[in-house]
Image (tube, coloured by chain):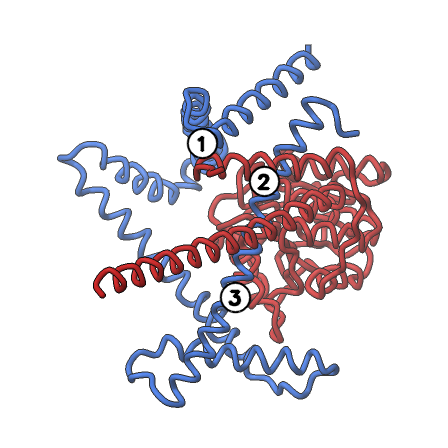
Amino acid sequence: MISIMNTFGVWLAAFFTLCIFSFLYQDNPFYKFAEQVFVGLSAAYWLVYIIYSIMVPNLFAKLAADFSGNIILLIPAALGLMMLMRIHPKTQWISRYPIAIMVGTTAGISMLRYMKSDILQQLTATMINPFAADTTPEVIGNLLMIIGTICGVYFFYFSKKQEGVSKAVSKVGIWFLMVSFGATFGYTVMARISLLIGRLDFLLGDWLHLIK
Amino acid sequence: MKISVLAERRIIYLVLLIAVALPLLFPIGWKTEVSGYTQMAYDLIENTPENKVVIISFDYDPSTMTELQPMGEAMIEHAFKRDQKIIATALWPMGVQMAEQAFEKVLRDYPDKKRGLDYVNLGYKVGGMVTIQAMGRDLKEVYPNDTRNTPYDQIPLLANTRRLKDVAWVSSLSSGVPGLKEWMMVARDSYNVPVTGGCTAVSAPGFFPYVNEQRQLTGLLGGLKAASEYESLIGRLGSATTKMDAQSVAHLLILVFIALGNIKVFVAKKKKTTKTKAFIIKRRKSND
């Protein structure tokens, strides 16, 4: 029985993969069908997952086991219910309070962390002696990093008209940015091809058994 | 013969499909050079003493498993080889199943490794950065039991692991938010625990600046190529290595397409300029 269900699952997955691939030829009913099924299934999956993996163990089970010990959980539960008030236009205003709390809390938690990791640590990592490295390629790498950082940041300095030396610095900044965009494009191609490889590996291996 | 843009696109898709399928069916066996970032991640695990407890967080779902699952399997195998104890966690719900699949595959070669003694799957927790922060204070509070409902205190592996500071390193295999960045921000920058990890190729350029003098990240595996590099470092012929031939052929083909596209635009521009010039000369002659 398990084997039959497995085979059925593989054929179903192959069918939907081919339905999605058919869009490459042109838009068609098979593609639309697969797209709608995916959207519906995802919504249903997440609903069930949120109830059974988040709500039940973190709220209902704890309250059922020890109500007075976990009474503080009623606060997030109430905030959650207030969020649901968005459904009705007359009670929509109530949902602004939990949203405000969420925005404030997230900003408070993230601000310090981002300040430390994305600004202070990154700045410190750039403040190095480039000639202290062991090998020549490392020294060149360090110099490029420092020049690239300074010129790249300077490109976004708009308070003064960029002419003369400042224009040259800005131009170097653009070149560094262009190189980084090229690298990003290369990595994006790699990621997209990986997705295609994954699907073809499934079709040729799991479905058609052509790959050993 | 003039081909329409739509027909051109279809030809490109078809050629790409064939180019990717053929190396999967008939592997070429091209070798990949190991990059410095992969080597750093490898060295971190290699130089960690045995019996140390480590965390591998599976922060992805099946949509990116082609790139991230081989990294997970390779890192588990490497940690097992070095006799390190693995705690698997997930900041993404489906990461739990990804971790189970990875353990199941690696355990075929390491049948002596036991759940609870050598590895444990603590499962998924909602909250991202806040959850990691809470793990920094008390792991048991965040994970009172594992995915098989075994209480935290009854898992031998976790006997001396109370908070994040007690683990030797953290690796996050991440395909978005929450993931590697959150681990780096909290585990590395707040609790000073070495953090390494892997990400999809598309997000790798965004993570490279964190592999710096400050060691915000100790190495990084970016995409399928880095996964195959890691497999070669631990001497494993895994799925990433076998898929790299297809990746390389596809990249070469895309380079050819880019070159052809540029030649086409160049020729079209030249034709247009010649036509315009001929038209101007003709107009001048008729005016004269």
Q: Are marks 1 and 3 on the same chain?
A: yes
Q: Is residue B119 left or right of residue A54?
A: right
The answer to the question of whether label 2 and label 1 lie on touching residues, with beta carbons closer than 8 A, is no
Toward the viewer: B120 or A29?
A: A29
Which is in the foreground here, disc 2 or disc 1?
2
Q: Amino acid at mark 3?
A: Ser
Taking the spot 31% from the left edge, 78% from the top edge, the residue there is A158
Write down the chain letter for disc 3: A
Q: Evaluate whether residue A193 shows in this view.
A: yes
Image spot of residue B118 (x, y percent): 78, 45
Secondary structure at badge 2 equals helix
Mark-to-mark CA distance, 2 and 1:
23 Å
The extreme front residue here reads: B288
Q: Which chain has been coloured blue in this picture?
A: A
Secondary structure at badge 3 equals helix
Which is in the foreground here, disc 1 or disc 3?
3
- Mark 2 — residue? A195
- Mark 3 — residue? A180
Image spot of residue B193 (x, y percent): 64, 64
Which labelled disc corresponds to residue A46? 1
Mark-to-mark CA distance, 2 and 3:
23 Å
The quadrant where residue B82 appears: bottom right
Write down the chain letter for disc 1: A
Give the total number of marks visible in the rendering. 3
Q: Which chain has been coloured red in this picture?
A: B
Q: Amino acid at mark 1?
A: Trp
